[in-house]
Amino acid sequence: MKKGLVIALTFFLLLTGCSSSNESMKEPEYITELKELGYQQEVIDELTEKLTTEELNKLTEFDYVEVLLDILNSKDYKAENLEKYLKYYEAGMNGEAVVYIVNNDIHYTYNEKLVSIMNHEYFIAENLDRYMSYESDNTDFIVRAVNSNIDKEVFENLKTTDTAKNELMLVNKYYQLPSSYQNKNMVYLSSKYTNKSGQRLNKEAYDAFKKLVEAGEKEGIYIRAMNTFQNASTVEKNYTASDDVQKDKTVFRSGHSEHQTGLAVDVNKKGAKTEEEWISSKEAEWMQENAYLYGFILRYPEDKKELTGYDFIPCHYRYVGVDAATYIKEKNITFEEYYAYFVEQDRQIEQ
């Protein structure tokens, strides 16, 4: 009797145990629904690692999101915005773009122009309205143009040059030197390095220029300084003396000339006196290829007129330091672009 009872009880426990096991092995309803929406098992596995049960259930209320993992893996992803991401998303959208648009409460309609602008290497968030207002189909040019401020009127609503940036200060048609500005770290050039007496440069720029000249001479290249530092009155005198109706493309106004900083140098070959002698020289070619190694850039290139606001000035070089000069040379950008993205935004160059 007891034996039969034990057998019956054991059988009962086995039956109920199996039933409980089957219940525990049944997948959650949200998993089933996610599969029905189109999510693959490997994606679901990753989702269950990243999201809470409440968030997983929230996913089932929306259509399939192809870039969901891109959204969740974005460095700017915010859990509190998950529902907003899901509501904003439409087929074909870029995950990173969705995160950026939602996080920054951007109200522009999602389109190819918007995404192209936001994906640009030199995109600056605070310039978005200006990018979108700029009339061009070329989004690459839009970003470069706005970052260079050419969507604004020249010599109006001027910013004051931040002279504390030293060799990275920006002086142009939108940034004006303070009237009281004086570069006190100035030195006279030895006659070995210039075609004209009385020339001065910022000491750091001069030290770099000497190394440049000496490196060139080892290769049979003889570069000399022609024009260096000019004070505000000299700059103004040169500007006033020009009768060219287009002189703002070639002549600098007082407060807007890099020559006032002691960081700019107009160069020529040894013994030459005219710009024409420089243009066709082997020294000009060498300078364009090697100046960056010593921290100098060709400040007003021929193919960057729209961005710099000045015509091609083949002899005008500006000292910005080796790191900046190297980046500008390798990326083929202007100093305006470099300043806007790195200096003004306080970004570091990624090595």
Image (cartoon, rainbow, N blue to C red):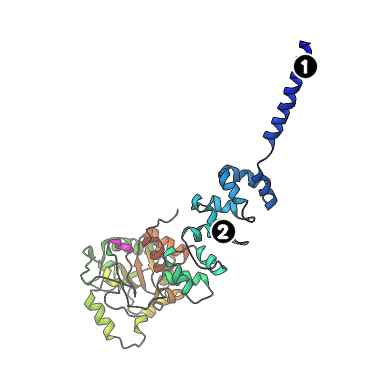
Please give the residue where the numbered disc 1 appears in the rendered image: 7
* Image quadrant assignment for residue 285: bottom left
Q: Where is residue 331 in the image (x, y as percent from the top left)?
A: 47, 64
Q: Judge left or right: residue 151 versus residue 198.
A: right
Residue in front for this viewpoint, 98 or 199: 98
Please say whether residue 165 is one of the residues in the magenta stretch.
yes
Query: In this picture, is 251 found above or below 64?
Result: below
Residue positioned 67% across, 48% down in the render: 33
In reply to whether residue 255 is colored magenta, the answer given is no
Q: Is mark 2 on a helix, strand or loop?
A: helix
Q: Which residue is drawn at 75% across and 26% down?
A: 15
How far apart are labels 2 and 1 at the CA level? 59 Å
In-image side of 72 versus 18 (left or right)? left
* Marked residue nearer the N-terminal end (2 or 1): 1
Crowd rating for badge 2 (residues with CA inside 10 Å; few <14, some 14–19, many 20+): few
Q: Which residue lies furthest to the front in this view?
A: 1
Image coordinates of residue 127 in percent, x first then y, are 43, 67
Quadrant including the N terminus = top right
Q: Nearer the viewer, residue 249 or 205?
A: 249
Give x and y (percent) for residue 169.
32, 65
- Which region shows up in magenta? 164-177
Residue receiving disc 2 = 87
Question: Label 1: how many residues lie within 10 Å, few (<14), some (14-19) or many (20+)?
Answer: few
- Choose top left, top right, bottom left or bottom right for residue 90: bottom right
**Residue type (three-letter) at the residue carrying disc 1:** Ile
